[in-house]
């Protein structure tokens, strides 16, 4: 007979990071501190802190995922669901740290590019308005 397992799902608005993965146990952190979950756990709902969620698969391998806060739900002692804004998965804490740094660098670069594009569009709009308004002033319209 096999040990009882939990099914883990971690989802963000953009993707399902972990989809129904059988796990043996899970560690997470909320405002009250760290806690563990095993199969048969009572139903619960809690708000996670921005932290690292760790779990062990039935074959003993450890995995982790950095979450930007979120909601953790235990259902029927057999399923753990986490909904969060952002999640970055890693096979080890060292890989997770590198993955988080890479994701953060990509986000900062995208934000910089978006600001440059926003500034460019704003300048273009101002130039268009000036082109539109200048001929009217020259004709004495609007005075």
Image: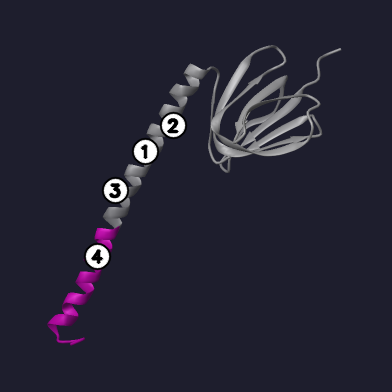
> Which residue bears the numbered disc 4?
126
Percent of width and height locating residue 27: 64, 24
Q: Earlier in the sequence, mark 1 or mark 4?
A: 1
Q: Mark 3 and mark 4 in contact? Answer it, CB < 8 Å.
A: no
**Secondary element at tag 2:** helix
Magenta extent: 122-143
Tag 3: Cα neighbours inside 10 Å, few (<14), some, or many (≥20)? few
Q: Earlier in the sequence, mark 3 or mark 2?
A: 2
**Secondary element at tag 1:** helix
> Which residue bears the numbered disc 3?
116
**Secondary element at tag 4:** helix
Tell me the CA gap for discs 2 and 1.
Answer: 9 Å
Relative to 3, residue 143 above or below: below
Percent of width and height locating residue 13: 58, 43
Q: Which one is closest to the eye, mark 4 or mark 2?
A: 2
Q: Earlier in the sequence, mark 3 or mark 1?
A: 1
Tell me the CA gap for discs 1 and 4.
Answer: 27 Å
> Which residue bears the numbered disc 1?
108
Percent of width and height locating residue 78: 79, 29
> Which residue bears the numbered disc 2?
103
Task: From the viewer's perspective, tell me whether residue 109 is left or right of residue 132.
Answer: right
Q: Which residue lies at the image location 66% right of the left edge and 27% below the top edge? A: 35
Q: Mark 2 and mark 1 in contact? Answer it, CB < 8 Å.
A: no
Occupied quadrant, residue 53: top right
Residues 34 and 8: in front is 34
Tag 2: Cα neighbours inside 10 Å, few (<14), some, or many (≥20)? some
- Most frequent secondary structure within the magenta stretch: helix
């Amino acid at each position: 007979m096999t040990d009882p397992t939990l099914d883990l799902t971690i989802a963000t608005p953009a993707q399902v990071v972990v989809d129904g993965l059988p796990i043996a146990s899970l560690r997470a952190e909320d405002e009250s501190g760290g806690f563990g979950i095993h199969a048969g756990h009572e139903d619960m709902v809690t708000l996670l802190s921005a932290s690292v969620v760790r779990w062990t698969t039935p074959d003993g391998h450890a995995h982790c995922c950095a979450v930007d806060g979120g909601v953790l739900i235990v259902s029927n002692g057999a399923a753990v669901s986490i909904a969060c804004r952002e999640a970055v998965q890693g096979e080890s804490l060292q890989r997770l740290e590198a993955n988080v740094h890479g994701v953060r660098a990509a986000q900062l670069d995208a934000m910089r590019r978006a600001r440059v594009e926003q500034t460019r569009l704003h300048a273009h709009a101002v130039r268009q308005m000036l082109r539109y308004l200048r001929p009217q002033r020259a004709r004495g319209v609007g005075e």
